[in-house]
């Protein structure tokens, strides 16, 4: 069993001062694979102090220096891509195809930001004034357990590109992924303190980051409930806040769609990352007149999905990340049945022939109403709800009938019609006839799915303040 008791502060791996120990469990085998001593508030203060010292020099760097740093980070992460893939499978249960994608995405974040930075102008003349885009300052980057290496690198690339030193707090449930990522970042040889990394709970490390007057910005990805707490705390020091929060995404299949092509994509959108994705399309809206055909195709396609060992390339759905996640999905399946939804496939318990691990049966409900819990709450597992509509207007209204608005999907053979639907959806991003996001497109949500945007140019500018100098 591996031991984790270090934070990365001021360019060095140092012992933490905390005393709380938690254990990591391989979700595929239920075996304990690690023990982590969590950082505490004193460690957070040390990391913030290191970032503040580094901020003075980082904000003075030019574009060429920052691009060099980003390229070094790109190479360093790419060199550890296989290790990132392997620990993502071991600790999180991500299927190898997903883990492989994450391992490549991590390095690509730095490459994309370097490319954007090369042509970005930090000054602009408007009227009698000159507008300067300047670093917001020390930034806290808070990362969820369902996408560790990729989210760390995406946020860090934007922060460094803007000239902001950072303190990174990944989920305390991800010590293996955090350690490998931290080692890779360290190998890039950046100056001390430009980034600092520690694992700790929200009530001490997270609270210190949210309340410290020496932190200028928080970039958080996680649940809406936690995001609201962070925002309330951050306002006392007027921190700039970016929040990527909960989703309950709708997939609208229009009546002219080619179901043979669309249904596999729609199911994949719902079950991506074992269903543990904020952008998962877990509400499938279909024309009522095509419901029976949809159900036949969904049932048949789900039956082809292999659930099992995440190391097997044939596996489509691996285990959920933890026992708590497993129990959460079981509860939602029961609630769906209690509230009158019809079970099409799946249900409670593990798949047949699987006796260990946090595996669930990929589950699909029909006859779902938009007021049911399974249609309104983020389940975070492979559970799909199918709803029906009569007209395009009704489909849009149903999709928008949610407190969330992160992502949406539209499928149609008529692109102009699909685009018309997309423009009426209350979502930060809409994908038409595809389920893969564009990493250069801004990413973020409407309503209670967040504040601000990440990725590409918008991600860079989220770490910049605007100063206008007008000369008489």
Image (cartoon, helix red, strand yellow):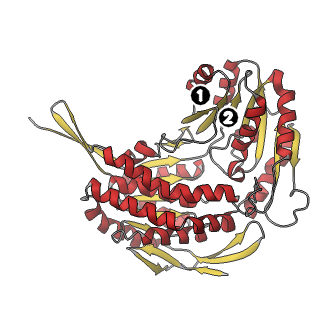
Which one is in front, 351 or 315? 315
Could you give the CA–CA distance between mark 1 and mark 2, rounded to whole angstroms?
10 Å
Mark positioned earlier in the residue sequence (1 or 2): 2
Which residue occupies 37% across, 57% down?
160
Q: Is residue 362 left or right of residue 466?
A: right
Task: Specify the label residue 192 is tagged with.
Answer: none
Mark 1 and 2 residues: CB-CB less than 8 Å, in contact?
yes
Q: Is residue 255 left or right of residue 300?
A: left
Residue located beneath label 2 in the image: 250
The percent position of residue 125, horizontal first and vertical second, equals 20, 35
Whether residue 147 is visible here, answered yes or no, is no
Q: Is residue 180 left or right of residue 351?
A: left
Task: Specify the label residue 425 is tagged with.
Answer: 1
Whether residue 421 is visible here, answered yes or no, is yes
Could you classify mark 1 by the number of other residues whose Cα lies within 10 Å: few (under 14), some (14-19), or many (20 or more)?
many
Q: Is residue 333 above or below residue 417?
A: below
Q: Is residue 287 left or right of residue 134?
A: right
Which one is in front, 199 or 209? 199
Which one is in front, 274 or 103? 103
Which residue occupies 36% across, 66% down?
194
Quarter placement of the N terminus: bottom right
Judging from the image, what secondary structure is the residue with disc 2 in?
strand
Quarter placement of the C terminus: top left
The percent position of residue 444, horizontal first and vertical second, equals 52, 42
The percent position of residue 170, horizontal first and vertical second, equals 54, 63
The percent position of residue 3, horizontal first and vertical second, equals 61, 81
Toward which corner of the image does residue 71 lie, by quadrant?
Answer: bottom left
Q: Is residue 44 above or below residue 414?
A: below
Judging from the image, what secondary structure is the residue with disc 1 in?
loop
């Amino acid at each position: 069993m591996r031991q984790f008791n270090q934070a990365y502060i001021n360019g060095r791996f140092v012992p933490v001062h905390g005393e709380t120990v938690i254990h990591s469990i391989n979700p595929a085998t239920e075996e304990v694979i690690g023990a982590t001593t969590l950082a505490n508030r004193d460690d957070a203060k040390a990391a913030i102090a290191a970032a503040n010292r580094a901020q003075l020099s980082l904000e003075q760097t030019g574009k060429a220096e920052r691009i060099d740093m980003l390229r070094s980070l790109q190479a360093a992460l790419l060199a550890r891509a296989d290790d990132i893939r392997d620990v993502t499978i071991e600790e999180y249960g991500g299927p190898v195809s997903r883990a492989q994608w994450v391992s490549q995405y991590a390095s690509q974040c730095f490459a994309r930001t370097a490319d954007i930075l090369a042509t970005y102008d930090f000054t602009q003349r408007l009227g009698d004034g000159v507008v300067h885009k300047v670093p917001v300052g020390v930034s806290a980057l808070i990362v969820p357990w369902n996408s560790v290496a990729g989210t760390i690198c995406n946020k860090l690339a934007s922060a460094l590109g803007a000239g902001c030193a950072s303190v990174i707090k990944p989920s305390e449930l991800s010590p293996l992924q955090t350690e490998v990522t931290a080692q890779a970042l360290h190998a890039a040889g950046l100056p001390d303190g430009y980034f600092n990394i520690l694992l700790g709970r929200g009530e001490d490390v997270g609270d210190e980051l949210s309340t410290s007057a020496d932190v200028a910005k928080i970039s958080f990805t996680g649940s809406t409930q936690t995001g609201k707490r962070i925002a309330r705390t951050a306002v006392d020091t007027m921190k700039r806040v970016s929040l990527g929060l909960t989703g309950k995404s709708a997939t609208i299949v229009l009546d002219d769609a080619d179901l043979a092509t669309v249904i596999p994509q729609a199911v994949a959108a719902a079950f991506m990352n074992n269903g543990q994705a904020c952008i998962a399309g877990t509400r499938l809206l279909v024309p009522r007149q095509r419901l029976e055909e949809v159900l036949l195709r969904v049932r048949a396609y789900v039956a082809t999905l292999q659930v099992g060992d995440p190391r097997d390339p044939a596996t489509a759905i691996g285990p959920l990340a933890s026992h708590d996640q497993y129990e959460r999905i079981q509860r939602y399946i029961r609630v769906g049945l209690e509230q009158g939804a019809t079970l099409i496939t799946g249900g409670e318990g593990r798949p047949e022939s699987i006796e260990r691990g946090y595996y669930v049966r990929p589950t699909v409900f029909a006859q779902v109403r938009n007021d049911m819990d399974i249609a309104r709450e983020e389940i975070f597992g492979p559970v799909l709800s199918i709803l029906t509509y009569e007209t395009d207007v009704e489909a849009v209204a149903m999709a928008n009938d949610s407190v969330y608005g992160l992502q949406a999907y539209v499928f149609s053979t008529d692109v102009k019609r699909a685009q018309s639907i997309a423009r009426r959806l209350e979502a930060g991003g809409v994908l038409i006839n595809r389920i893969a996001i564009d990493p250069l497109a801004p990413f973020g949500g409407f309503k209670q799915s967040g504040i601000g945007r990440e990725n590409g140019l918008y991600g860079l500018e989220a770490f910049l303040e605007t100063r206008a100098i007008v000369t008489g």
